[in-house]
Amino acid sequence: MRAQILAAGFLAAASLLGAGQARADADNFTEVERGKYLAILGDCMACHVGSDGQSMSGGHMLETPFGRIAVPNLTPDPETGIGRWSADDFNRAMHEGKRPDGTHLYPAFPYTSFTLMSRSDNDAVFAYLQAQPAVKNQVDRSTLPFPFNVRLLMAGWNMLNFTPGTFRPDPNKSDEFNRGAYLVEGPGHCGLCHTPRNLIGGDKGGAHLEGGPLQGWFAPSLTADRRTGIGAWTEQEIVEYLRTGVTHRSTASGPMAEVVELSTSRMTEADLKAIAVYLRERAPAPAASNPTPVAATDSRMRAGEAIYLDSCAACHVGNGAGVAGIFPRLADSQFVQQGDPTGVLRVVLQGAKAAATPHAVTGPAMPALGWRMTDQQVADVATYIRNSWGNAAPAVTADQVKAMRSVAGGH
Ligand code: HEC
Ligand code: HEC
Ligand code: HEC
């Protein structure tokens, strides 16, 4: 694609067209390349990828708390894609969450973050999308069950949860901090997963980036809390995690592995650093949440320890320290100590595979172990790792494991 555009630019420059045309083509080339990078920042491909695995021709079904929703075709096909859209139409979708006919888009499309993107950035993304090959793929957009299929309802949702925004840099902060803020809150839409939702799917006020459940996973807190957030992570550790999906603290699996593969591993080092600076400086740590650990003498802890030594210690090591670069450490792990145990249960029941990136090609895998443990055993080993080696987090019950099996499988 890049070669084609280069060739086109070259031919135009070499032809008898005026110098003005050549410059216009060169400008468009830069605009398309800029849009391509912005599409990486926004991870458009993660949701809009077509069944060919190459184009953004959509068709994929997205699980939401309200039902399954179909992802539309963004290629320039005039009938089934956005070939007939103008740059204004596109900007309106990104900025206001509305289709050209004025109907509301569902916020499974993260326009509540994209609204902070500038007009010039949206124009570049649009130029990039329009420069892709058109792919015909008719997507059925009416898949949500009643009453959520009523797009008019979205007008009410928007009144409660959404005001189109503009990104305002903080004049008291560095350019790097402000770039990070733009990336995290705007195109990067990190809050889509890392901010808990309220009952109608909007961001829970006052809990920004404090961690939230999604489709049987849990996106941990990104606050400065040292036990559950990134307060103890250095800038370099955050950069490393986003670039490769692996640090000695944690490995990215599930939805975060996808974010790393398609988006953050392709960001520039400067942008990753800006994200790290912003996350570390954006807000002081919330009042320390220090639950009392479940006592080592508790029967659940004793049962959990026996299971741990039998089934987990071979990889994660007896004291939970893991093995750098291969088996994540569980001691002093933010992932393990989230208030909500969904992430831990998911990994134990179903296993997990780390991200594959150009920086770390074959990710290590965690085997699924749920099939050979009872609900009580899974609960006990989870309680054990959440309350050993200095960790502290609420105990896990067999009922929580049972509920998790029905979402995530792992029988
Ligand atoms: C988390 C998944 C997700 C991501 C990431 C995402 N989208 Fe979407 N997008 C959707 C869904 C779902 C819809 C359909 C919403 C609806 O039907 O109301 C949609 C709709 C759209 C539409 C409206 C199209 C139409 O025909 O109505 C546009 C334009 C769009 N997305 C552009 C983008 C761009 C550009 C990016 C990257 C910067 C992006 N999206 C990233 C899920 C996503
Ligand atoms: C599609 C949902 C989703 C999006 C979008 C997303 N994340 Fe995540 N993130 C997760 C999940 C789930 C985990 C836990 C994965 C694991 O540990 O295996 C995670 C883990 C992390 C962690 C490690 C936390 C820890 O304590 O282990 C960091 C750091 C992180 N994400 C940063 C980001 C940033 C920065 C963005 C935006 C650029 C982002 N995430 C966007 C779902 C998401
Ligand atoms: C064969 C080696 C192996 C065994 C046995 C094993 N694990 Fe893992 N575990 C891994 C690997 C590799 C990962 C990283 C996978 C990933 O990133 O998706 C991992 C990830 C995890 C994570 C997520 C850590 C994070 O920061 O994302 C938890 C929690 C975990 N294991 C707990 C356990 C428990 C509890 C047991 C025993 C019931 C266990 N593991 C047994 C290899 C193993």
Image (cartoon, rainbow, N blue to C red):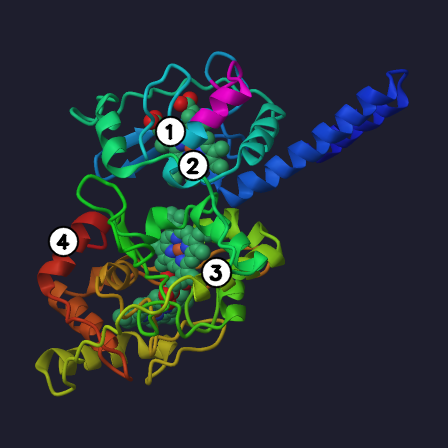
Q: Is residue 87 magenta?
A: yes
Q: CA distance from mark 1 to mark 4?
A: 34 Å
Secondary element at tag 4: helix
User: From the Cβ of disc 1, is ligand 1 less than 8 Å away?
Assistant: no
Task: Verify CB contact (< 8 Å) between mark 2 and mark 1.
Answer: yes
Give coordinates of residue 164: x percent, y percent: 38, 34
Q: Earlier in the sequence, mark 1 or mark 4?
A: 1
Secondary element at tag 2: loop
Q: CA distance from mark 2 to mark 1?
A: 8 Å
Q: Closer to the observer: label 3 or label 4?
A: 3
Q: CA distance from mark 3 to mark 4?
A: 36 Å
Give coordinates of residue 292: x percent, y percent: 16, 80
Q: Alpha-carbon neighbours of circle 4 within 10 Å: few (<14), some, or many (≥20)? A: some
* Nearer the observer, 56 or 43: 43
Q: Which mark is residue 21?
A: none
Residue corresponding to mark 1: 97
Which residues make up the magenta segment? 81-92
